[in-house]
Image (tube, coloured by chain):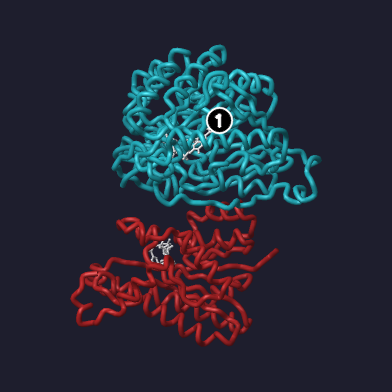
Chain colours: A red, B cyan
Amino acid sequence: MNKGNVLILGARSDIAKAIAHKFAADGYSIQLAVRGMSDMESYVSDLALRHRVSVTTHEFDVLAIDRHLSFVEGLEELPVVAVCAVGLMGNQSESEENVASAIQVMRSNFEGPASIFSHLANCFEVRGSGTLVGISSVAGIRGRASNYVYGSAKAGFSAFLSGLRNRLSTKGVHVITVLPGFVNTKMTEALSLPPALTAEPVEVADAVFKATVRKKNVVYVRSIWQLIMLIISTIPEQIFKKLKI
Amino acid sequence: MKLSGWGRYPTHNVRESAPRSIEQLQEFVAAGSAVARGNGRSYGDSAVSAFNTISTRHFNKMISFDTQTGTLVAEAGVLLGDVISSFLPLGFFPYVTPGTKYVTLGGMLAADVHGKNHHLEGSMYNYVDWFEIIDASSKMIRCSRKENSELFSWTIGGMGLTGIIVRVAIRLRPIESAWIAQTTVPVKNLNEAIDAFENNLSSTYSVAWIDCLSSGGSLGRSIVMLGEHAHESVLDDVQKKTLFKHVDRAKWTLPVALPRCLLNRVTVKVFNAMYFRYGQKTKGTRLVSWDSFFYPLDALLGWNKIYGRRGFLQFQCVIPLEKSSEGLHELVTEISSTGGGSFLAVLKRLGESAGGISFPMSGYTLALDFPVNGRNMKLMDRLEQITLQYGGRFYLAKDARMSKSTFRSSDSRVTDFISMRENSGMNQNFESMQSTRLGL
Ligand SMILES: Cc1cc2nc3c(=O)[nH]c(=O)nc-3n(C[C@H](O)[C@H](O)[C@H](O)COP(=O)(O)OP(=O)(O)OC[C@H]3O[C@@H](n4cnc5c(N)ncnc54)[C@H](O)[C@@H]3O)c2cc1C
Ligand SMILES: NC(=O)c1ccc[n+]([C@@H]2O[C@H](COP(=O)([O-])OP(=O)(O)OC[C@H]3O[C@@H](n4cnc5c(N)ncnc54)[C@H](OP(=O)(O)O)[C@@H]3O)[C@@H](O)[C@H]2O)c1
């Protein structure tokens, strides 16, 4: 029952791992794309043992945009689903003091993911099928003082995904924008997040899997976030600019 | 953060970390007073350290499986339920399983868990080939029956007090089918229950549910359940098609703690009466799924909230074989006369002991739950005294309240365990709220 490959970019992320397990459990082969292979052995054996699917690893750096085309061409099999979980939250105050680190955050969350998705989209378009899943963030819905560098890059990525979806909707290629709120992962380990608003990585994986099957366009994880963001985006700028949120 | 065991009592405000690499784990251990936490299914404070509780949740990968020998190598944080869903389809099942599949392999070794087949096949100890552990000097070492054999023996059953297990090699059992041929034997009282166990020592699985509220001539009326992995030949066509099928049963989640008044003598009596009527009706042998045979409670996720906000206690002791009948009669009489609102007690025949400080010994073990309140605390004091009087001992994986002196007088091996910990420096590096309370 070979269902084809699911390519996971930024596969070491906790969210990506949960997504890999979810698709593998359904019988998909898995292509794991990460930068650096040092700790991948047990990850691969685990996926293969639990789900008896083929698992391959691929060196991938989202910032090395000049190598993205050859990365895609080098895949033995073009995936049926590609998920981008790459992300870099960075540190807002550091981004303010040091513009170079702000640019790294912007490139890691927007330029790099948009670049790799552009190549994949072109291949999917030629084939006439495929699903692209971009993990963006609710942080991209409105810029806030506490993390607008990260947020702006996610906003760019979300807009890119929406345009891509529009372009490919008649070409058999589907694009999904995932907008998680807080998720309990390595990225947020040091923060103390409100439990009721914080999803586990498996919830993101379930949402992504469902969205792929049902061809959804934009998915929130934990629906409360849709309401929160609705409220946040309707606050008049005059008031918003003075808020500490 | 607030942490407790499955009984939700006692609760402590502690620091928990979740290292992602061996190096990080070693650093945490070096900080001292550490204890591992698997999936928190021990009832009391075994997996809670005031300063340094270390979750194994990121050590959750399976590494290899040998279909010839059934040997699985996996990290200690892997859940038993995942082992089943991964290898049942290949025709393998755990040799030993507790009454829930939501436990980690590390937790199963640390408690040296026993299952319904202990009388015949022993505890987890028997199915561990080797493990790797971060020891008191923060080094990772391998232990087996040949290599570091003393540490091997103290660790299986040692409740996390000898180090943090990171990787294990255990053997799984090849089975003909995942269906269980279950034989239900309703019995009128405790003596008949003991007879049923003794007459069925060759049954792979045996367990009894005792009604602890009945008294007089029906003191200890029970439903004894025997089980075997069904041979392919006894299955019908549909069952043959699902020889090793892993079906996820419908699960229900109990979202909030129930009000305490829901569990009282009347409701429990009604429940028990219904249960025993059902037992009478299902008397005889029939095929049941492995999930409902081994894990009836897993169908209700979060059932531990049934006992209300204050949580609950579990009492589990074992009475040596030659005094089992007398000891059990006295225990059940005490419980039936106080009626602390326990649903049902589990009675089980155990076989020989294995690990250095493991709980099981040849005899009968009785386990039951009580909501936390003053009256039940006193009842448990009395149950402990009765157990001591008959030379029995207590299961640390269930304990949340025992006193130092009770534990010490229950088990002559405790002093050796304490001096072993002192001599190796383990007492500095590994400590749980339970070990502090019990002076281990
Ligand atoms: C519904 C239910 C039914 C049960 N039925 C049975 C039964 O039939 N038979 C039986 O024997 N037990 C039974 N138990 C008890 C259970 O099997 C044990 O408490 C087991 O240890 C729980 O595993 P865990 O992963 O949740 O461990 P935790 O509760 O997290 O930890 C338990 C102990 O193991 C130690 N530990 C955990 N991981 C490691 C590690 N990696 N290295 C070193 N130490 C570690 C902890 O420090 C602690 O002392 C039952 C429990 C429940 C809730
Ligand atoms: N956690 C949350 O609360 C939350 C909320 C909303 C959205 N998200 C988004 O969800 C996605 C997954 O994040 P996560 O929470 O699982 O956190 P994470 O563990 O930090 O995952 C981010 C992943 O991106 C990878 N990455 C970063 N830069 C890279 C590069 N140059 N090349 C290749 N890979 C790179 C990292 O790889 P390394 O492992 O090699 O560092 C890491 O695995 C991200 O896009 C994140 O923005 C997270």
Left or right of A239 on screen, residue B121: right
Q: Determine the residue positioned at 66% across, 44% down.
A: B289
Residue for badge 1: B114
Q: Please give the chain letter of the residue carrying mark 1.
A: B
Q: For residue B223, which quarter of the picture?
A: top right
Label 1 crowding class (10 Å Cα cut-off): few <14, some 14-19, many 20+?
Answer: many
* Residue A50 place in picture, x, y as percent: 60, 52
- Mark 1: C-beta under 8 Å from nearest atom of ligand 1: yes
Task: Check disc 1 and give the amino acid type.
Answer: His
Quadrant occupied by the C terminus of chain A: bottom left
Percent of width and height locating residue B187: 63, 25
Q: How many marks?
A: 1
Q: Is residue A105 in view?
A: no
Where is ligand 2, by quadrant? bottom left
Image x and y of residue A168, in percent: 54, 85
Q: Is residue B176 above or below residue A199?
A: above
